[in-house]
Image (spheres, rainbow, N blue to C red):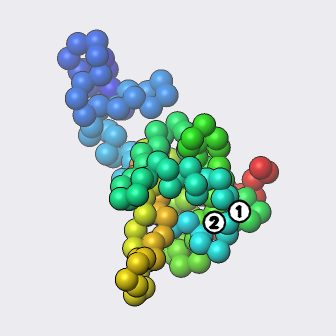
Amino acid sequence: MTCSGCARHGDGEHLPRGWTRIDQAVLCNTCYRQRYRRRSFTLKLNGSRAGDAPEFVSVLEQALGPGGGEVLVHHQCWHFAVTLRGFVVRLRLGGKWSALPLDSSKWPRGRRTDFRRIAAGRAIAGDLRVLRMPTPGSVASNQHQPVDIVCKTVAWLPRPSNPKRRRAEQRPENDPPDIRKE
């Protein structure tokens, strides 16, 4: 096994520990870290539009159970998308695909840019965790604590090949288009 970046040789025919296979390329840990940066995302579903998918909410409630917990969605069973209605996460849960709107009202420009890169397939996304979290700033009543449905994931975003290109890649005109047909 040989690294596509530095031509370093690994032991045996299996992928060595810490190495990564991306499409047809095999990268050692050092080359992988030079080409990609790790970024974690915690994204809240848009509560005002969550009613658009009542079937999903019932399937999610069944999967989470009465005590809460989380649902792990394999990286091949979900993806981000940018639509006319805004940013959405599409995932397969309970045998059905659902498009769920995300609350992007407080996102900074960097997060929007990173989201667009993931949606365009220019980044590598990991598995998605869907869970319930207490709503920040809410007061719990005796019976019920208000909760938000939150998605968490980790993505590896490509690093610019040279420092001068970093600023050019952050300009809005270099982002992929915002609108995708559903």
CA distance for labels 2 and 1? 5 Å
Q: How crowded is mark 1: few (under 14 residues within 10 Å), some or many (20 or more)?
A: some
Residue shown at the point (53%, 74%) measured from the top left: 107
On screen, residue 138 versus residue 12, left or right, reads right
Residue 171 visible in image: no
Please state which amino acid type lies under the numbered disc 1. Asp
* Residue 87 percent location from the top left of the image: 64, 62
Q: Which residue is nearer to you in this view: 8 or 73?
A: 73
* Residue 86 percent location from the top left of the image: 69, 65
* Residue 113 percent location from the top left of the image: 56, 63
Residue 100, picture quadrant: bottom right
Residue 138 visible in image: yes
Is 157 placed above or below 174 here? above
Residue shown at the point (57%, 41%) measured from the top left: 94
Image quarter in which the N terminus is found: top left
Residue, disc 2: 50
On screen, residue 58 versus residue 17, left or right, reads right
Q: Which residue is nearer to you in this view: 169 or 32?
A: 32
Residue shown at the point (43%, 63%) measured from the top left: 132
Mark number displayed over residue 52: 1
Mark number displayed over residue 141: none
Please state which amino acid type lies under the numbered disc 2. Ala
Q: Which residue is nearer to you in this view: 58 or 83?
A: 58
**Label 1 near label 2: C-beta < 8 Å?**
yes
Residue 138, picture quadrant: bottom left
Is 83 placed above or below 123 here? below
* Residue 15 percent location from the top left of the image: 29, 22
